[in-house]
Amino acid sequence: MTTKLFGEPVRRREDARLITGRGRYLDDIGAGALAAAFVRSPHAHARITDIDVEAALDVEGLVAIYTYEDLTGPMAEPLPVLIPHPQLHAPRTGYPLADGVVHHVGEPVVMVVATDRYVAEDAAERIVVGYEELPVVVGIDTARAAEHAVHPDVPDNVAARHHQETGDVEPALAASPHTLTFTQTIERSACTPLEGKGVHARWDPDDGSLRVYSSTQASTSVRAAIAAKLELSLDRVEVIAPDVGGGFGVKIVHPWPEELLVPMAAMRLGREVKWAEDRREHFVSSAHERGQRQEVTVGFDDDGRLTALDVHVWHDNGAYTPYGIIVPIITATQLVGPYVVPVYRVVVESLYTNTVIVTPYRGAGRPQACFAMERTMDRIADALGLDRAEVRRRNLITPDQFPYDHHLTFQDGRPVVYDSGDYPGLLEKLTALVGWESVEERRAEAAGRGKLLGAGMALYVEGTGPGPYEGGHVQVLGSGKVLVSTGLTSQGQGHETVFAQIVASELGVPMEDVEVHTGDTRRFGYAVGTFASRAAVMSGNAVALAARGVREKALRIAADVLEADPSDLEIDEGLVQVRGTPGASIPLRTVAVLSNPLRYAFDEAAKQATQFATHDDTKPPVAPGDAPGLEHRDYYSPLRSTFASGAHAAVVEIDPQTWEIDVVQYAVVHDCGNVVNPMIVEGQVHGGVAQGVGGALYERMAYDADGQLQNASFMDFLVPYASEVPDVVIDHQQTPSPLNPLGIKGAGEAGVIPGSAALASAIEDAVGRRVAAMPISPSELYDLVRDDTAERTAASTRRTGATA
Amino acid sequence: MTSIDTERTVSLTVNGVPREARVPVRRVLADALRDDLGLTGTHVGCAHGVCGSCTVLVDGEPVRSCLVLAVQVQGAAVTTVEGLARDDHRGGQVLHPVQEAFRECHALQCGFCTPGFLVTIAAGLEARDAAEEITEEEVDELVGGNLCRCTGYTNIKKAVRHAAATMREDAR
């Protein structure tokens, strides 16, 4: 049989070029292109009174300057609300260039095009924009107070009020033996891929066509947006995502102003134009996420079992809502996690502030959801004096309850019905992996060294692989090469490798013969995009189905040649053979040649398919309903999302002198169904955990009251270095999804989800003070411990010694 | 008024090859390498010297090429990621042990920060006694100055150990 590839830690195809400097990222394309730079608003909320470009006109090398006045047709209209929703009652979006009013620092006001970026910035800094400052709204509390409005026609600053409930929560709470009510907050962070956004556009005036390269997670939809905004026929626009230097969600938003303006300039100037985002631009004019305030009321019985849950979330959506209320919906629906919640009500109010937009960052509302639910579990345990793992165990959905319907509506408009899982299995593996039973001994040992030790855990369920669909195309060439394409994009997930593994396994060919292309609308025009841990599920299944179609056709053609029944044939190592009859075989590449009846023999192989070489004159060369070529296109469109799951535990040691928080152990149990490539899945988990730790201990967006982002650089926004990221131990569980042919669930986001919840739990366990705001720095922890009014956990009062 | 006050011709050796570029004096080395010499393997991640993606070797020492002007490296020998592999004199290349280790250990995902890590680690490993087993402190030191947003560093550290072990074998 063909070497088993599905499930193997196959080394990546991508790496050969990336480790030798031969990758092709956005800014590596278009040497000699004109460069764009932007004049961006220095104010969080202001009316533009004047734009004076006079001083810039003398800059040698200046080519063009564009303001809102230069935008015509659809370009002069607001940017699209990409994901409309009935509960998004007041959607607002900006313009490609500001139309009179700016709503956050960093909003583009003027685009300058020049011979190179240095010159473009020279010209940009000479442009004088007059502003009349308007009142600024920063932070959830200020937005709720609504003394000022971000958008005058939305006086309460509420963009959306998202509401779901599964029963009558108030009587259920009233009837609960115990209730707890508490408030907690989580701060803003951001994706910060090492490569910022970027766009390169080339207009062909003779052909009337536009080619755009964009560092995007959604090339097909960028293409459609450009065609609509620039009033081009879709077939005149092609969009390609080249090598992309990380995405983590920020590059799913589109069209970014620059994705429209750079092509517009290329068309007007008849020259190639490029813009590569710099780091400050990325901080102030891309997107952030995570900022929420949560009020939780939970009812539970004497055993710690949930009876009712009522959650009110205030979500900071920044100045505009181009991505709709996807993040609020995900928080609302993923909050229930792996637990049975008899009655649940959630309201998420999405609020405007004069800050950069809030759109999905890896996890997309799930880290906040997990923070709410898992800290609820910790509080129940504390109130009842129970072990935190035990309280969770009592509330878990059990394996015999699948499919499990939460009676909620997910981000894809489909019901939240968990397809499969084994949550008690996760918890058991986790407690064993981290050594949960020995935490008290370790606490005592650490206390002997003058350290405060604490442990925490968090479980999650992650809806992955939402529709509507992805497609795949597989074609076998006469050379034996197998071309695979799918429309969604790649930002480091190793799609070239995993899709090749899937196709090689399905088709029975050596992996070296398979070549995968993603995110190129010239090759595949129909796609949704890479987000929500969906690529392996959606495109993985699509390319598998396409490969199965190719296999079926190959067997049919080979059966004719070999005078055998197709069901007696197998394909192994690129050879179609009669099972159990050595020698009765035909190479797949020959089948590919024969699949395309020819008149002209352009090479040696082609001779086999010409009219005098083939012999059956009783049938037309191409049968009705058939097509020339050994290729197949297929689509995978799921009924609903798959639900992956996992459990993390963290052990921290805190120095009571410096209050430095050292994560000394981090354990992960992960279940994403069948695994195509365990090496890649582990890599995804590692990266996610690092972002989870960053979000819990280091990263925040420090806006001042004027809406100035005080830490818009890598000097001040603390992306963890290696020294801040703990070693991660991983255990796996595989509960296949019954929803798709390959039985897989997504893995991309999982690692980041429980970070803040698990670390808050561990820190709280170490210091005995309630940790209700994340991230937490050593200074904040010091303040918390020194605050006499800070709530002490009941567990800490039961414990003797070893507490701050 | 002109925006370009002065230009200079800079002569340097890049990856063993003498090169010359006529550059504005304000052009940083990263841009000169990428735009004037066509070596786009060096990436600019932050342009303020923190992320380390743009790291190249100047006379063997890791340098953030976004913080150095091209005119400052007049006469120097610069090594970029394109220069890490060696010519095998049969039309191909022999990868540096660090490059091999990165592939073997899945130490890269998007690959954008990778060139900076590769040249830094390669320089560090070559500067030490290859016969000595590498310590965890050395590993931490070699990876500690660069940012990666994809990998969580676990596999990068693994790759350093792997590369050091390979070089140790070779040194025997």
Image: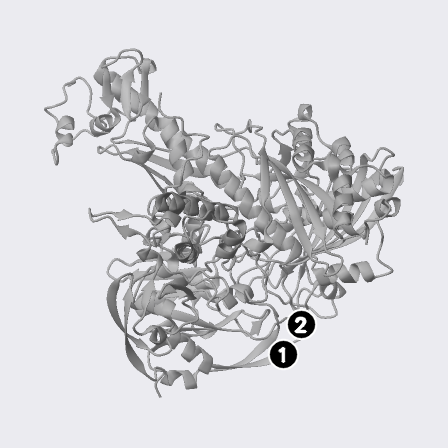
Label 2 sits on residue: A136
User: Around disc 1, counting alpha carbons within 10 Å, would you say few (fewer than 14), some (14 to 19), or many (20 or more)?
Assistant: some
Within 10 Å of the Cα at label 2, are there few (<14), some (14-19), or many (20+) other Cα atoms? many
- Please name the amino acid that badge 2 sits on: Val
Distance from label 2 to label 1 (Cα)? 9 Å
Q: How is the image coloured?
A: one colour
Quadrant where the N terminus of chain A lies? top left
Circle 1 residue: A133
Secondary element at tag 1: strand
| Apparent side of residue A625 relative to residue A341 in the rendered image (left or right) | left
Instruction: Name the subunit of mark 2.
Output: A
Using the image, tell me which numbered label, if any, was put on residue A688: none
**Residue for point 43% across, 47% down:** B164
* Image quadrant in which the C terminus of chain A is located: bottom right
Looking at the picture, tell me which residue is in the foreground, A675 or A286.
A675
Front residue of A163 and A800: A800
- Report whether A304 appears left or right of A130: right
Contact between labelled residues 1 and 2, with CB atoms less than 8 Å apart: yes
Query: On the rendered structure, is B154 left or right of A572?
Result: right
Q: Residue furthest bottom?
A: B1
Name above or below for residue A447 compared with residue A478: below
Q: How many marks?
A: 2
